[in-house]
Structures are given as C-alpha cells and as structure tokens.
C-alpha cells in the first residue's frame, strides 16, 4: 500500500493549473525563439522549455540540477535561482550531438530541485525531472515529487532517473505528511520541441 506520505496520482493537470501558466508559457516560447535566432540554440536538437508556477506565498530557490543527457541553455527564474511567491520561473534544456565521448545525438533529460530558503524550521522541496528523446517515436516523460527537503536531498540521481523512466507524460504528487504537492505535464510540439507546465504548492491544514 502506498503510504500517506507519498501519494502519487497520475491524472491530467487541472485546467486551473494550466491557465495559471499560459501567459508565462508564451513569454518563454518567445525567449526560446530569440535564443535560437541569436545562435544560442540548435533547431536540429531536442529542446525542452519548462514553466514552473510557485503557487504558495513563500519563495523557493533552485537547490540543485542535473543533466543525464543534454544541457541547460537557460534558467529563467527570478534572480537566476529564486521563484518568489505566486510567481513563475522556468528553464530551457537542449539535447546534445554527443553523449560523453560518444558521437551520438541524444535528447534532453534532466532534473531540477527547488526548496524553501527562509529561516523556518520545516523546509519543503519540489522535484521536477523530464525526458524528451531525440527519437520522435519514443514517448516524452515527466516526473514530479514534493515533500520534506531533507528527504528529497537524500535521493540519488539514479533513483530519480528510475522514477522518471517509469513515469508518463503527466505526473502528480501529494505528500500527506507536509502538505506539499507538485504537478507536471510534458507535451510535444513537433519532433524536436517539448513544453513542460509544472506547479509547486503547499497547503496548510
């Protein structure tokens, strides 16, 4: 039985959650187009842009990030690493023409972890991981998780990758112990471009 502390429901991101980030999506798409036109991107490689909505009043900070395949082009959070309360942040991540020393084109596969940075006793964390394959015949995947920041920080990247590989295009997670929740959806636009909409929240009983 799944514990009350880790309740994950794979269902569609709600229309309310989608509408809250639509404006930020448009701004991010415009930023991507500018980056590509200015030579910062490559139209031949898989490209993922993500928009994260922080739906709580407390700000969150980027704690760490990881590249399994590809690399970040930009992290669009306010002040580079911080997403303030009820504000949007985001990122752009691109595939690569090589994987290590092997000359093989790979897709975009990475993760980001955000957490509270203020002085309160309980610090919560939110995890977002994704995979946009270079091969359009493979499905794009996303995984979201939320809860105690200390517990999330103890997770190895290999464990997170396993959870991502087992996920689908939509992921929702609600932590019964802390009230933290996360929702994410990845949607393909053509063979090479994917868009992630994510929301991080905390409900107080």
Image: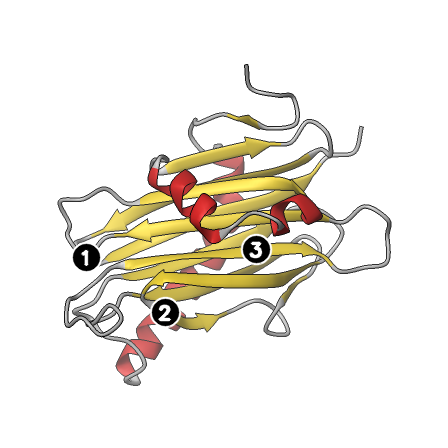
Farthest residue to the bottom: give it.
38
Residue 71, numbered label: 2
Distance between the alpha carbons at the discs numbered 3 and 1: 24 Å
Out of 135 and 200, give the one closest to the viewer: 135
Q: Is residue 34 above or below residue 176?
A: below
Out of 118 and 90, give the one closest to the viewer: 118
Distance between the alpha carbons at the discs numbered 2 and 1: 14 Å
Q: Residue 4: x and y, percent?
A: 65, 21
Q: Quadrant of the C terminus?
A: top right
First of labels 2, 1 by sequence position: 2
Question: Horizontally, is 64 left or right of 163 in the view?
Answer: right
Distance between the alpha carbons at the discs numbered 3 and 2: 16 Å
Q: Element under label 3?
A: strand
Q: Quadrant of the N terminus?
A: top right
User: Going 86% across and 52% down the picture, which residue do you hit?
Assistant: 120
Q: Residue 113: x and y, percent?
A: 57, 55
First of labels 3, 2 by sequence position: 2
Q: Residues within 10 Å of mark 1 (few under 14, many from 20)?
A: many
User: Going 79% across and 33% down the picture, which residue do you hit?
Assistant: 204
Question: Horizontally, is 141 left or right of 28 in the view?
Answer: left
Residue 113, numbered label: 3
Q: Residues within 10 Å of mark 3 (few under 14, many from 20)?
A: many
Question: Horizontally, is 113 left or right of 135 in the view?
Answer: right
User: Going 76% across and 49% down the picture, which residue do you hit?
Assistant: 123
Residue with the mark numbered 1: 134
Residue 46 visible, this orientation: yes
């Amino acid at each position: 039985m799944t514990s009350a502390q880790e309740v994950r429901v794979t269902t569609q991101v709600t229309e309310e959650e989608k509408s809250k980030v639509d404006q930020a999506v448009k701004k991010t798409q415009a930023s991507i187009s500018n980056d590509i036109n200015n030579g910062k991107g490559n139209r031949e490689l898989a490209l993922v842009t993500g928009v994260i909505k922080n739906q709580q009043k407390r700000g969150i900070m980027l704690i760490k990030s990881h590249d399994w395949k590809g690399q970040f082009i930009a992290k669009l959070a306010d002040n580079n690493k911080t997403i303030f309360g009820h504000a949007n942040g985001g990122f752009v991540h691109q595939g690569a023409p090589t994987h290590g020393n092997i000359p093989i084109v790979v897709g975009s596969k990475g993760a980001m972890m955000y957490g509270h940075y203020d002085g309160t006793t309980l610090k919560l964390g939110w995890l977002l991981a994704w995979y946009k394959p270079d091969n359009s015949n493979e499905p794009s995947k996303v995984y979201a998780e939320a809860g105690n920041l200390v517990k999330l920080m103890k997770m190895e990247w290999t464990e997170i990758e396993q959870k991502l590989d087992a996920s689908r295009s939509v992921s929702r997670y609600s932590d019964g112990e802390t009230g933290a929740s996360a929702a994410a959806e990845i949607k393909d636009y053509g063979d090479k471009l994917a868009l992630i909409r994510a929301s991080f929240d905390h409900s107080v009983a």
